[in-house]
Image (cartoon, helix red, strand yellow):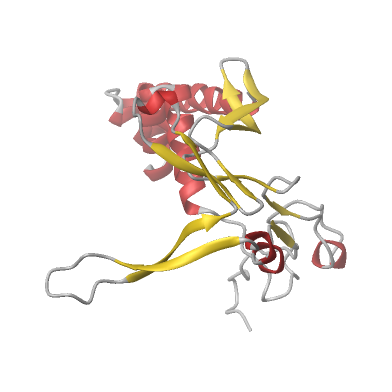
Amino acid sequence: MEPEGRRAPVTLDRKMEMRPRTSEMEPALDGVVFAELRHAKRGGGGEVDLVPVGGRIEYGPIGKRFKSKSRCLVRMGDYIFSNGEAEEPATVRTDKGVRMGAVRVPLGGIVRLGEYRPIERYGAPKGAAANDNTPETVGTSQTASPAAFDFADPVEDAEYAAHLREVVGAQTASILDIAVSSSGFGDVGRRLGYIGKSAERHGQQAVLDACAALDAALAA
């Protein structure tokens, strides 16, 4: 039971699909020969790792951008790994907005498992969104299962906020910061250097202009 006046956390039931699954990962290693190798440690007792040493493994040159003659593991069983140059389809931000493009798979990242690419995605919302006729949008339903995911991602939010600050510019971002912590337009105007009725008038216009810039950035 939530305290009066306090809303429950906004959640929404969704199924998350991650591939490869554990049941797919182990069979994909058939034919790979592993050996236990102990890390060197003064006095002994170094940690032991299981390392592929033979069978269905393949090494290839590391990506040219690394400017190294080293070789890296590019195949292990049915796994295909990136040498640092492989790319995968993704949405990317350009000077013309968000577009479909490609991003580089990091060195050692899984490129494929057999014929399939690794995926991590959420399915369509179910159950809770229909219970109170709210739109099927993340963060709308108040009746989701208590075990449902809260889709707030603080890292992503911080990165997006930093991007918006860069887009709207330092001055506009500063005005928005002031507006959030101010008691009114007059307070904003005074912090911008105005006094009297002029402070309220200029403060209001500054906030409206800043909000318009933020709306344009969000719509881009």
* 197 to 109, vertically: above or below: above
**Residue at the extreme top of the image, as rendered:** 96
Query: Which quarter of the rendering shows the C terminus?
Result: top right
The answer to whether residue 206 is visible is no
Nearer-the-camera pick, 121 or 41: 41
Query: Which quarter of the rendering shows the N terminus?
Result: bottom right
**Residue at the extreme front of the image, as rendered:** 55
**Where residue 50 sits in the image (x, y, percent)?**
44, 67
**Residue at the extreme left of the image, as rendered:** 43
In this rendering, the count of numbered labels is 0
Nearer-the-camera pick, 15 or 83: 83
* 201 to 58, vertically: above or below: above
**Where residue 103 sits in the image (x, y, percent)?**
57, 31
Residue at the (51%, 46%) spot, across then down: 156
**Where residue 67 sits in the image (x, y, percent)?**
34, 25
**Where residue 10 sits in the image (x, y, percent)?**
65, 63
Residue at the (72%, 55%) spot, across then down: 122
Q: Is residue 207 left or right of residue 87?
A: left
Q: Quadrant of residue 19?
A: bottom right
The answer to whether residue 82 is visible is yes
Residue at the (41%, 27%) spot, across then down: 203
**Residue at the extreme bottom of the image, as rendered:** 1
Nearer-the-camera pick, 72 or 87: 72
Q: Is residue 207 left or right of residue 111?
A: left
Residue at the (75%, 63%) spot, across then down: 15
